[in-house]
Image (cartoon, rainbow, N blue to C red):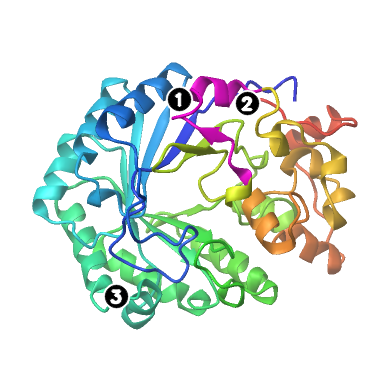
Amino acid sequence: MSEFRFYPRVAVWETTFACNMRCLHCGTSAGKRRPEELNTIEALKLIDDLAELGCKSITLSGGEPLLREDWRLLAERIKEHNLEMFIISNGFIMDENTVDDLLRLKFDNIGISFDGTEETHNHIRQNPKSFCQAINAMTLLQRAHAPFCAVTQVSSINIDELAEIRRLLIEVGCRLWRIQMTTSTGRMRPELTLPLSHYPQLVDTILEFQKDDDTILVDVGENIGYYGCKGAQLRKGEPYLGCHAGMRVIGIESDGTIKGCLSMPESFVEGNIRKTSLSEIWHNPEGFAYNRKFRRQSAEGKCFDCHYLPLCRGGCAVTSVSSTGHRADNPYCIYRFEQNEGILPEDSEDILRILKRFEEPVAATDQ
């Protein structure tokens, strides 16, 4: 890891735990506001501290971030630091005034959660009006020429509706679609996550969608693909360099709790900014050890012997931990399926060049 400079380039911030939905797949079981969420002064200082550490991008998440009354003030401070700024909303309370504010504050992209046809989306969101409100939010954003995307969490509930979701998004004028996979964290029950038997179907479906990127661009989530023939196709030949939690990514809970990634369970907490400064937490030589001190011995099962372990380090840490209990024993890897079928990938020159640099212990490279 000596070649990798650790700084929180990307921050994903749960600005509030409050939410107006009770989504089945919620990775944090959001609902009621946490008892001691950061106040405005603390939140503004957090933004300043992130900028000082070299942060380049902040995503306002939740819960439902639009339920935090001072979200506009936070956005203004982020832009004062000239940082990229994103928000992920369920769209339920978004109206024309909200869209005007999002435009005025110059959000770089506005994500709207969208998970299926009307019946399925409402079932997942546990709200009979959620589908219509999400469609309305995207319609308002499209009419205002605001930059927006749809974010879909794929599970056993909606895996067979992806083509219909795509049709609906094209119809509403959405031009960017981020597809992620649910994990059995928070409120999400393990039996509702995507079965391993359906994982190749998900990969093949996304590859088919990517053939028509001119209609709607598909952005593949961090926990889909990795290496092998189809993994390389999904990422269009770009080497995938694994989970960056605690190395280039930081997750912040609404009460100031710090993790490498917001989706990680509470066992991955690194500290709280009310007790220790953000700089001290980030620069702790023993912090974020699951990634910063990753070695081949950190891996289990098929990941341990994998040709690509020096690059992907087991892929998404949350997916692996939630599936097997290990940091790097990730069954949701398309290369594993190809190995079982006897398919041997032909590595690109870039991948071969990077792999040649690695010997034990396994490390990561800078970009």
Q: Mark 2 packing: few (<14 Cα in 10 Å), some, or many (20+)?
A: few
**Along the horizontal axis of the image, is 333 left or right of 78?**
right
| Identity, as a three-letter code, of the amino acid under mark 3 | Asn
**Residue 31 spot, x, y in % from top left:** 35, 61
The residue shown at (66%, 49%) is 317
Question: Disc 2 vs disc 1: which is toward the camera?
Answer: 1
**Mark number for residue 367?**
2
Q: Nearest to the eye among marks 2 and 3: give it.
A: 3
* Proximity of marks 2 and 3: CB atoms separated by less than 8 Å: no
Identify whether 172 is placed above or below 248. Answer: below
Tell me which label, 2 or 3, sits earlier in the chain: 3
Residue 276 within the segment the image draws in magenta: yes
Please, what secondary structure does the residue beneath circle 2 have?
loop
- Who comes first in sequence, dot 2 or dot 1? 1
At 61% from the left and 57% from the top, the residue drawn is: 224
Q: Secondary structure at mark 3?
A: loop
* Foreground pick, 129 / 307: 129
The residue stretch that appears in magenta: 268-284
| C-alpha distance separating marks 1 and 3 | 36 Å
